[in-house]
Image: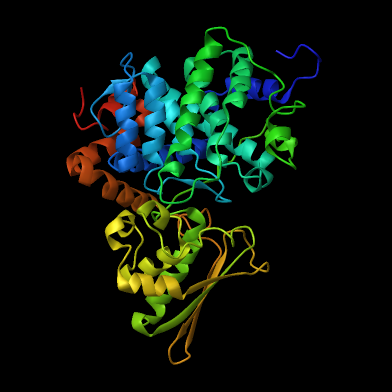
Amino acid sequence: MNQTSTTPTIAERLADHFTAFDYARLPEASKHSVKRLLLDYIGVAICGSQTESGEVARAFGAVTGGHAQATLIGGAERVPAMQAAFANAISSHSVELDDIDVLALFHFSPPVYSAALATAEQTGASGKDLLVALAAGCEMMERLSKAANSSLRNRGFHTTPTCGTFGATVAAARLHRLTAAQLVSALGMAGSSAAGLMEMYGPSMQKRFNPGPAARSGVTASTMAGLGFTGAATIFEGERGFLRTFTDRHDAAQLVADLDQPYLLEIEFKPYSCARPIHNAIDCALDIRRRHAPALESIRSIEMARHPDWAHYHQNKRPKTYHEAQVSLPYAVAVALTDGQALFPQFNDARLGEAMLLRLSDAVEIITDPTLPRGVSCRMTMIMADGTRHVSQVDYPKGSIQNPMDDGELRAKFDSLVEPVLGAPRAKEIAARIASIEDCTNVAELMALTTKSGAR
């Protein structure tokens, strides 16, 4: 614990807060949020496990060997918890359909859920234990992002792994049943493990990798602390701590704000298989397509106004791989206009050279408009060959808190991701297990269903 002052450090206050969590006191809203996200995470991870990046991650988890503690989603092996957390985090980030926070700065589930599920299997945890750990981990991650952003992101650090390492650590610590003192140490080690750079866009798999080490580090920090390894109690506010090192400006008070009040988790979901700040642009395109049915060959230009927060991102008009296409606003707009949707099948290498997609991508011009109300806001102005103008502005994309995906839409997304890999009967069984996860006595029963070999 803190040896230099009688005033508790931020880590000590957070450790007391999170170790006091239990299922009975967890707000119903939090239970509902993390349970919905569990369905989404499993579906996205199963689909992502079959991509190139997911397959490499699973292969790495399998070939490195060790005790059979946790499941490689979408495979057939059980591996050490740290390796399962690592591989599953990469799989769940491999199709750009994972959840998002309201500011589109990070994804909760790849680091937090991957670490929690692997640790839950390792420890034989129940469904109720899992829900508590997930809520705690997500809250930790969001609190730190609120304290550190947008300076963290603007300095080039990727929020998902940097803040996610702490969320993964708290989730794993809950399942390892660490004491408050042990959790302080685990948070200290999480700070030394936090990493992840925004230099991740391009034709490579780099972006997919980032949450893997965060999930693994969370399990590692928790395990080490449980074995007696100690860490710095001043990891957040210290002279060389996380906030001063990773940011130019921060608000440390956000980390411990209203600890005595129920925490509202704001988790959003992605209906489109690309970077979240692009979703507003897709919704604009779909809105114009639905209302005006423009003849694609008659589109002269497409002006896309974006808020300064995101105006300089996602501008690549000629992606070379589907990885690049998923972070290309012009391509996403083009495929939404042609297909009327932007799911994973729309983002594939075989389509990148289609003449109409190239034409529409080239027609998109991104401009900056600081008057737009939100960082992710977009306003599309489509000009036709005859001078007709079609305009659509979207401030809250589909899947946001203000424009949510309902349970039916979330289930349809899940089925579309799982059925091609494991079949409709298995998808139905997994969804049913998640719906009653509170009654599950051992999370391993659920995870067994996520493999190609099926329940054991």
- The answer to whether residue 188 is left or right of residue 271 is right
Q: Residue at x 61, y 22 (%)?
A: 187
Residue 242, horizontal then vertical, whole percent: 68, 31
Residue 72, horizontal then vertical, whole percent: 31, 28
Depth check: 266 or 394 in front?
394
Up-down: is 404 above or below 151? Answer: below
Residue 158, horizontal then vertical, whole percent: 56, 42
- The part of the image, by quadrant, that contains residue 149 is top right
Q: Residue at x 44, y 37 (%)?
A: 209
Up-down: is 104 above or below 132? Answer: below
Determine if residue 230 is in view. yes
Q: Residue at x 52, y 53 (%)?
A: 401
- The part of the image, by quadrant, that contains residue 324 is bottom left
- The answer to whether residue 62 is left or right of residue 85 is left
Work out which quarter of the rendered image holds the N terminus and state it: top right
Depth check: 134 or 25 in front?
134
